[in-house]
Amino acid sequence: MHRRSRIAAVLVLTSAGLSSSAQLSLTSAVDLALKSNPRVRVAAADVNKASAALAESRDAYVPALNAGNGLGYSYGYPLGQPSVVNVTLQSVLLSWSQRDYIRAAQAALQAATLTLNDARAGVEQDTVVTYLALNRDLAREQALNDELTHASQLVNIVADRLNAGVDTALDLTQAKLTAAQTHLALLNAQDETAVDQVRLAHLIGLPLARIATIAGSVPALAAPTAAPELVLPEGPAVAAAFANAKSKQEIAWADAHKVHRPEVYFAAQYSLFAKFNNYALFFPINPVTGKSVFQYNNAGIGISVNWPIFDPVRKQQARESDAEAVHALAEAEIARDKEQEGHTQLARSTAELSAKADVAELQQQLAQQQLDAIRIQLQPGAATAAGPQRTPKDQANAEIDESARLVDLLNARFDLQQAQVELLRQQGLLDGWLRAAAASPTVNTTP
């Protein structure tokens, strides 16, 4: 059987065996993850918070309107200001620091937006890789089941040959060991499948259940680049780190400007004093009207100037903010260096994994061709005196080897896919690849 036909058959049998499971396409899984994953929700909440902080810093120039009252009883000379209505307006009129705070808030919003983009890309990547892993797991389980069936047949064949005096007890023990090792590999594969199903369920926010993949919903991945020195664009995580550093620097400048520069505030107030208090008793009488000159309606407007001459607290606060800015910039530079190192390593490892996958493919093809040759030689009338005499034992061994090579190929293909998905994310092409999957729901049947 041809390699692709063999893999397709494995996938079909796997889907048939899991018909009771919930089948989910790749794009559906990614859409669910982006809507419900906590990492995306946390990053989106941070964006909303940063947006509100920016609006708050800008609204410092917008007069704040407050209304209240101070009703109360007074005896003797009135204490305080018992007013029926008290309305105040206050805002920043001039502040060198406020402009820096606004720029800091803008940079913080940019950092939060970039962090959200990075969180979305990270969730997309995790979901795709987990989906591909589960897709591999299900196909690998079927291949290992086939291998275990062939290993059990080999045990029976060797036992019959032992009874006939053809094989030895050592041969039977070796056959049993092969069957036991295959059974252990199957159990390990089933455990890995269960873990990947749980992980995928957590990513997409669905109750824990047996989730089956749809192999045809996975689009083909581009061939790895042959240039290990591939220059990749700066990722959103690094850009967010530098935007955060810029925000910290703006805050440091704002705090430094508050040390020796004045701040000017606008203020206005209106108060309607209560008539039932005894305020009028303590004001002089107007000789013309014969009434107290006490005024019930009162208003005031003006500016307030605050010029710090010596304020050690503000000075130390400016030093603290400057240190935080230096710290944030150093962290951004470290993140950039690590990302560049990761780019180089990823480009080289992708090329290496591609070569390993080619080797695994050729090994599987060779095992398949050897198995086909043995099957032909075992057909009636096909035996020749020139060639070796084939037996059912040879066929069972070849079938075991072919299934084992198929498992190796599935693992090698997944390792390559995992690196290719990471490369797509770092190139900023993962969204486009997923859109292609949505546009062509049945584009590929080879894991």
Image: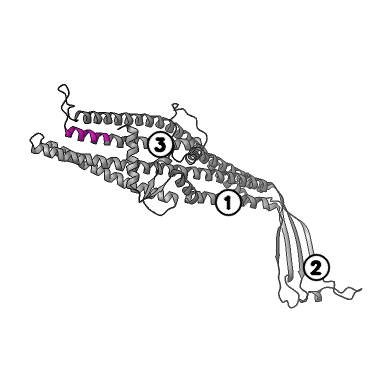
Q: Name the residue under label 3.
A: 417
Q: Name the residue under label 2.
A: 297
| Residue at x-position 52% and y-position 34% | 233
Q: Is mark 3 on a helix, strand or loop?
A: helix
Residue farthest right in this picture: 288
Spatial CA span between label 3 and label 2: 78 Å
Point out the tag, 1 or 2, that comes first from the N-terminus.
Answer: 1
Circles 3 and 2: CB atoms closer than 8 Å: no
Q: In this view, does 439 lie above or below 362?
A: below
Spatial CA span between label 1 and label 2: 43 Å
Amino acid type shown at disc 2:
Asn
Point out the tag, 1 or 3, that comes first from the N-terminus.
Answer: 1
Query: Is residue 87 rendered to the left or right of residue 390?
Result: right
Q: Name the residue under label 1.
A: 48
Q: Is mark 1 on a helix, strand or loop?
A: helix
Q: Where is residue 329 in the image (x, y as percent from the top left)?
A: 54, 40
| Residue at x-position 46% and y-position 48% | 33
- Asked whether the viewer can see residue 229, the reply is yes
Amino acid type shown at disc 1:
Asn
Residue farthest front in this picture: 381
Q: Nearer the viewer, residue 37 or 157?
A: 157
Magenta residues, start to end: 387-402
| Residue at x-position 40% and y-position 36% | 417
Q: Where is residue 372 in the image (x, y as percent from the top left)?
A: 25, 30
Q: Position of residue 94 (x, y in %)?
A: 72, 49
Point out the tag, 3 or 2, that comes first from the N-terminus.
Answer: 2
